[in-house]
Amino acid sequence: MPAPQDLIYGRNPVYEALQAGETIDELLVAEGVQAAGRLGQALALARRAGIPVRHVPRAALDRAVAGHGSGSHQGVVARTPGFAYQDLADILAVAIRRQEPPFVLALDAVQDVHNLGSLVRTAEAVGVHGVVLADRESAGVSPAVRKASAGAVAHLPVARADLATALDDLRARGVAVVGLDVAGDVDVYDADLGGPLAVVVGGEARGLRQAVARRCDRLVALPMHGHVGSLNAAVAGSVVLYEALRQRRRPIP
């Protein structure tokens, strides 16, 4: 179901939302801003879609995005009915449509909006079919997450669900569930990530919850050769996603 009225701000996020055909009520554009580059492209898409464009003082945009996280609005804000979450079935339907083995990113209580946005951006870049967010203790898709994802969230389905139940469902469908954990007993580069796959990344505070870790077919860890013991969720998750992409691109014998 859609969330209450929401905002999209920043030139790339607004452009990507328009390009993806998301429902947008109106665009607010700063008075005097030059309609070139990405902004010009966004305004052209809005005109073709019949979306109202209103020019307002820049201070009005500053007030509109206040409290929605860090990041500049870059002179444009879109008002929307709110982000519409989809279901796990919608994610799997993307894999069927592309005739590819399922490739899913599951996030267990990732609360930092910048980590969430970065992970969604990486997921879209590597061809993930969709993202599942834990329905408890997890950030949702907010204006700040849209900004941090550079608009990538507009291009892949995002579901919110009881994560343990969703992982059980994926396993029942033949999808291998691989959790990223500093205590994992398999090096990520030794793990088989090439087939139907769900990568699970834990939250910043405590990693994977026990109920989620139990659903994983295996736990993988990143090799660490320096003095720090771990990477943040966005960086670590991105490494695993790109290793999965590398393996999925192997020629079939």
Image (cartoon, rainbow, N blue to C red):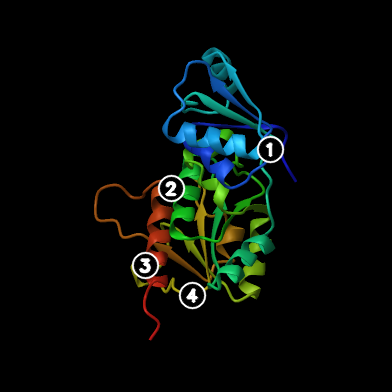
Q: What residue does disc 2 label?
A: 234
Sequence-wise, the earlier of marks 1 and 4 is 1
Q: What residue does disc 3 label?
A: 246
Sequence-wise, the earlier of marks 4 and 2 is 4
Task: Answer above or below: position of 151 versus 164.
Answer: above
Mark 3 is surrounded, within 10 Å at the Cα level, by few (under 14), some (14 to 19) or many (20 or more) other residues, namely: few
Sequence-wise, the earlier of marks 4 and 3 is 4
Task: Answer above or below: position of 81 versus 59.
Answer: below
Residue at 61 percent of width and 54 percent of height: 157
Sequence-wise, the earlier of marks 3 and 2 is 2
| Residue 111 or residue 31, whichever sits in front | 31
Q: Amino acid at mark 4?
A: Gly
| Residue 166 or residue 248, whichever sits in front | 248
Where residue 215 appears, as percent x and y from the top left, is 59, 66
Spatial distance from mark 1 to mark 4, Cα to Cα?
A: 34 Å
Asked if labels 2 and 4 touch by Cβ distance under 8 angstroms, the answer is: no
- Asked whether the viewer can see residue 105, the reply is yes
Residue at 73 percent of width and 34 percent of height: 4
- Determine the secondary structure under disc 2: helix
Q: What residue does disc 4 label?
A: 195
Sequence-wise, the earlier of marks 3 and 1 is 1
Asked if labels 1 and 3 touch by Cβ distance under 8 angstroms, the answer is: no
